[in-house]
Image: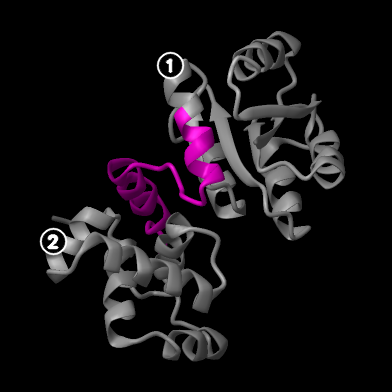
């Protein structure tokens, strides 16, 4: 059973999501929050697997709530729901620790699939969206890796370092496998080891990590 917490300041939106999720035998709504502060409290109290998080809310918004949930050590995967594709709230939420985002107009079957994907430990940003996010993150000149980061990177094997750089270019597992001439199962293993060694939540944050520490530069072609 996948435990889901609903966070949105609009009652009708929460009610619609609850009705949809309650039709699924493997999904359980464990709580509803109308603002970020309530979301943080309920995340601690209900231990959800997935949090459907609105970003634009009065008081504590979804970005700050996501940051607080992640900082608390919660294992919940935050799925940001937004009206506008790739706006500043989405960028901020991904940096804060969200595992992905979907538009509120997303068809129900895609939203349900997204919840299950996050519960399985995967991020749900497609490669094209990841590339657009990373292009935005790369606008500023990337800093050189600090000493602590250098030590973490030194734990990676040569192959894992290659995979990290390709993640930083927004490549999917299939694209990485084709580039390195390895199987997708092997690629998934490398990605998991990279996340474990660097203490990162998912592949999206591995890509952001690569940009933030100057390992990958914005490509102009």
> Label 2 to label 1, Cα distance in Å?
31 Å
Q: Quadrant of the C terminus?
A: bottom left
At label 1, counting other C-alpha atoms closer than 10 Å, the crowd grade (few under 14, some 14-19, many 20 or more) is few
- Identity of the residue drawn at 62% across and 20% down: 21
Q: In percent of the image, x 84 and y 47: which residue is there?
A: 44
| Magenta stretch contains residue 100 | no
Of the image marks 2 and 1, the number of the one nearer the N terminus: 1
**Occupied quadrant, residue 173:** bottom left
Please tell me in which quadrant of the rendered image residue 203 appears: bottom left
The residue that disc 1 covers is 107
**Image coords of residue 144 (percent x, y):** 44, 81
Judged left or right of residue 219, residue 106 is right
| Element type at mark 2 | helix
Would residue 12 be visible to someone looking at this image? yes
Describe residue 31's horizontal placement relative to residue 189 as left or right.
right
Q: Position of residue 77 (x, y in %)?
A: 61, 46
Q: Which residue is mark 2?
A: 178
Q: Nearer the viewer, residue 102 or 109?
A: 109
In this rendering, is residue 154 above or below 18? below
75 relative to 29, above or below: below
Residue shown at the point (51%, 79%) measured from the top left = 197
Query: Is residue 87 visible to the viewer in this orientation of the structure?
Result: no
Placement of the N terminus among the 4 image quadrants: top right
Q: Residue at x 37, y 53 (%)?
A: 134
Q: Report the magenta residues as a range.
A: 113-140
| Mark number, residue 80 | none
Display coloring = one colour
Dominant secondary structure of the residues highlighted in magenta in the image: helix
Q: Position of residue 7 (x, y in %)?
A: 72, 28
């Amino acid at each position: 059973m996948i435990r889901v917490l609903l966070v949105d300041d609009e009652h009708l939106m929460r009610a619609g999501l609850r009705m949809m999720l309650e039709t699924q035998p493997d999904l359980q709504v464990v709580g509803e929050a109308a603002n970020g502060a309530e979301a943080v409290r309920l995340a601690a109290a209900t231990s959800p697997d997935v949090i459907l998080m609105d970003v634009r809310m009065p008081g504590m918004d979804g970005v700050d709530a996501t940051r607080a949930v992640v900082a608390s050590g919660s294992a919940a995967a935050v799925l940001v729901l937004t009206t506008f594709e790739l706006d500043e709230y989405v960028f901020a939420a991904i940096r804060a620790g969200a595992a992905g985002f979907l538009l509120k107009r997303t068809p129900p079957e895609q939203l349900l699939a997204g919840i299950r994907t996050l519960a399985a430990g995967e991020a749900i940003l497609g490669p094209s969206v990841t590339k657009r996010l990373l292009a935005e993150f790369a606008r500023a000149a990337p800093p050189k890796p600090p000493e602590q980061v250098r030590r973490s990177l030194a734990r990676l094997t040569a192959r894992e370092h290659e995979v990290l750089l390709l993640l930083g270019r927004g490549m999917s597992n299939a694209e990485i496998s084709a580039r390195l001439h390895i199987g997708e199962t092997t690629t998934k293993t490398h990605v998991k080891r990279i996340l474990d060694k660097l203490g990162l939540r998912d592949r999206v944050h591995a890509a952001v990590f690569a940009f933030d520490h100057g390992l990958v530069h914005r490509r102009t072609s």
